[in-house]
Amino acid sequence: MTTPPKIALRGLSKSFGPKSVLDGITLDIATGESLVVIGGSGSGKSVLLKCILGLITPDAGTIQIDGADNTADFLDKFGMLFQGAALFDSMPVWQNVAFRLLQTRMPRKDARELAIEKLRRVGLNPDTADLYPSELSGGMQKRAGLARAIAASPEIIFFDEPTTGLDPIMSGVINDLVREISTEMGATTVTITHDMSSVRAIASTVAMLHNGKIRWHGPVSAIDTADDPYLHQFISGSPTGPIETLR
Ligand SMILES: Nc1ncnc2c1ncn2[C@@H]1O[C@H](COP(=O)(O)OP(=O)(O)OP(=O)(O)O)[C@@H](O)[C@H]1O
């Protein structure tokens, strides 16, 4: 028997009123794969992610994780790094990192120790554990968000624009961490980004969304030589090409 893909999407469609956003997305994501989803603004990347997370119900199609249909306990398998890190301002950093573990009634002392270990893994020293998120720089907040995403050792991690708002050097650091940690944990990851340096640093495979469909899908090593004018325009950032731009 062959093992099913970690995530299997079949014929996913979603419209909002008359606007079709996803129009039959079929995609397999293998265990340990690091998929980066690219596509223009409004192409449906976030809607796709929210469908997999179960936050939006698709109009048609199926989502399977490990060969089983979408159920509420899927969320236990997921870790998520949100845009802007989305830390709770009212809690010290360690409680943010250990948030889910505290909810599962892990003793506070153990949760705190684990949070400090995860903070260390993302390059933050133990002193940051007792600071509040507002006391951290943007780059440190991203690291703390990353520590939270990996705290419960999830099998699948979603990264939504992991480098937004960071300078190029910090973006490089976060990209490397995302890749390293995913590989080390053997996690399957799905990342949304506009940043081509993130694509190259994080992806094993790339899927490009356009007009509600997967326009191109393949290994990251093939993106520069792929014979697709849409993909080519996107990765070169050219204002001219088949993709319509608003001026
Ligand atoms: N809850 C909603 N209700 C109505 N329309 C929505 C909703 N969520 C998303 N949309 C629409 O779906 C389309 C795709 O949105 P989505 O946020 O997935 O794009 P995106 O590719 O992530 O864009 P960006 O790169 O700008 O973040 C947009 O036209 C958006 O207005």
Image (tube, rainbow, N blue to C red):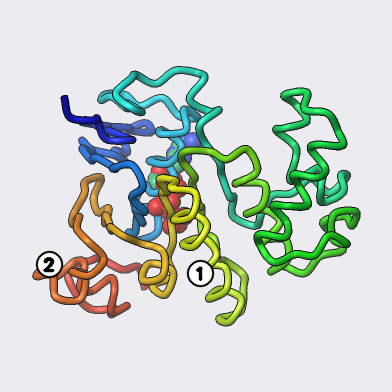
Residue 242 in the image, given as x and y percentages of width and height: 17, 68
Residue bearing mark 2: 228
Residue 24 in the image, given as x and y percentages of width and height: 20, 35
242 horizontally vs 125: left or right: left
Question: How many numbered circles are shown?
Answer: 2
Q: Is residue 93 above or below residue 169?
A: above
Give how far apart the Cα atoms at labels 1 and 2 are: 28 Å
Q: Secondary structure at mark 1?
A: helix
Residue bearing mark 1: 176
Quadrant assignment, res 16: top left
Q: Are marks 1 and 2 in contact (CB under 8 Å)?
A: no
Q: Earlier in the sequence, mark 1 or mark 2?
A: 1
Tell me the residue at 80%/45% (across/down).
Answer: 113
Residue 57 in the image, given as x and y percentages of width and height: 41, 24
Q: Nearer the viewer, mark 1 or mark 2?
A: 1
Tell me the residue at 84%/49% (across/down).
Answer: 89
Circle 1 residues within 10 Å: few <14, some 14–19, many ≥20: some
Using the image as rendered, state which of residue 160 and residue 46 is in the foreground.
160
Residue 126 in the image, given as x and y percentages of width and height: 83, 60
Kind of residue at badge 2: Asp
Kind of residue at badge 1: Asp
State yes or no: Cβ of the residue under disc 1 lies below 8 Å from any atom of ligand 1: no
Using the image as rendered, state which of residue 1 and residue 239 is in the foreground.
1
Tell me the residue at 41%/70% (across/down).
Answer: 201
Q: Secondary structure at mark 2?
A: loop
